[in-house]
Amino acid sequence: MLLLGIDIGTSAIKISVVDADKQTCVASLRYPEEEETAILTPEAGWAEQSPDMWWEHVQQAIRSLNNQKCYNPQDIKAIGIAYQMHGLVMVDKALNNLRNAIIWCDSRAVSIGEKAFRALGEEAALASLLNSPGNFTAAKLGWIKEYEPVLYDSVYKVMLPGDYIAMKLTGTITTSISALSEGIFWDFRNKRLSKELMDYFGFREDLIPTVAPLFGEHGRLSKEIADKLGLAAGIPISYKAGDQPNNALSLNVLNPGEVAATAGTSGVIYGVSDQLVYDRLSRVNTFAHVNYGLDDPKVGVLLCINGTGILNRWVKEQFGKGLDYEDMNRLASTVSLGSDGLKILPFGNGAERILENRILGAHLANLDLNKHQREHVFRASQEGIAFAFRYGLDIMRENGMSPEVIRAGKANLFLSDLFTQIFVNVTDTPVELYNNDGSVGAALGAGIGAGVFNSSKEAFQNAKALRVIEPNPNWNYEEEYGQWLHLLENQLK
């Protein structure tokens, strides 16, 4: 029996086919294979992508993977979907997409969310929503209502990116409590859609799709689409989750105190708690985890840094012509700890939650034109990203989340041994690396939702760490981090 996992990332679509009996990946593919999907910026601080492009890429990816002849597509019995969080997708009654999605790193709705936070009452909002509406999906929909009212009036349903792809596969529109919480629509205290938030914005409740269990049926593959993709009609979409809860699932991070990390376009540390915790400044955010229950409220405390892999990509484009990432890492390794004084603030991808939704921009400081070469920039960018993680992790520690170990998939920046060691030393926290990714996690989630596995424990019974990276006693980053922090604080004045 095979399971299909689809991960709708910002830079690409990743799909994997997993053998349910062995819990091992049979085949996987990234699409587009070489280039990265563009983020559209029609105005400064805006960030959009086309949902129809995601759908086209999903179809191309599935057909391309089937053509590798590594498996029989007819043996796929369930589909799971992971997706970039907080995006806003809207369709009309004919289920046609109405505009480009306003994605997670778009900053246009910050002031709208902050105004809602004050109007709802900050203490009341935090006690119920666990977050400020900030720059999340509800605030983005508020922006549409205010600035694109004609389009707003034609909206039939509001969705997150994964909901849209599930709809295209099945014709069915659903959401989950976890998804509602990431859009800041869910009232944790009263265990329902937030009437107060909906009333404040004037949103109709019928804009929200039917709420289904996250591990459960979200529609069945239509015959028309099954024929196009070479799959069996009627197989269920049996799991759907945001990329960071899903990344935690893929690393078997399900219990209080367990912590996962990822460093793709954005960087995230995600810890599980059984307490309805929140940061008073909403610098880190709390959402319903994949195993959240009304009577067992497991939540994920999420630290997000927008400018991680996107900074690494920018550095490659500007300074690494003719190099691949392995070449960059090799050159960066020739530079001493601290990059000979060169410092980089990686905050160049929209409003940063850990900076209280400030749009700071990326900064390169202390550049010495007689000393610094491109290898210094390569290392300084990785150090700057790790310093940002440390800054955010200290906020999580203030809120009671102090991990003894962090689990990460060997992907994106964690493919770099140099970055991984810098991260471990800067945060003073060991990292367990696993050979897993979001699309494999989505496939295993589909198995849980379809009843292929009796429990999540069974789904991950074969998961073993590739290795554990401990802090290097010869790498002391405290002084370097202090200098970086001083630079950041000066910019925040």
Image (tube, helix red, strand yellow):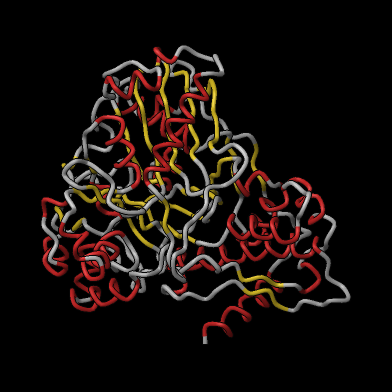
Q: Going 55% across and 15% down the picture, which residue do you hit?
A: 70
Q: Nearer the viewer, residue 405 or 230?
A: 230
Location of residue 446 in the rendering, given as x and y in whole percent from the top left corner = 35, 28
Foreground residue, 90 or 96?
96
Q: Answer left or right for 76 relative to 112.
A: right
Q: Is residue 428 above or below residue 132?
A: above
Q: Is residue 338 left or right of residue 139?
A: right
- Where's residue 489, x and y in %? 56, 82
- Residue at 68% of width from left, 77% of height from top? 483
State the quadrant of the N terminus.
top left
Total residue callouts:
0
**At x 39% / y 50%, what residue is drawn?**
272
The image quadrant that residue 276 belongs to is bottom left
Q: Position of residue 184 (x, y in %)?
A: 26, 59
Relative depth, front residue between 446 and 203: 203
Q: Residue at x 55, y 44 (%)?
A: 408
Which residue, as the protein is rendered here, is positioned at the far front?
Answer: 150
2 shown above or below 124: above
Q: Quadrant of residue 321?
A: bottom right
Residue 290: give x, y in percent of width and height: 33, 42
Of all residues, the one furthest to the right in this rendering is: 370
| Left or right placement of residue 383 versus residue 67 in this view | right
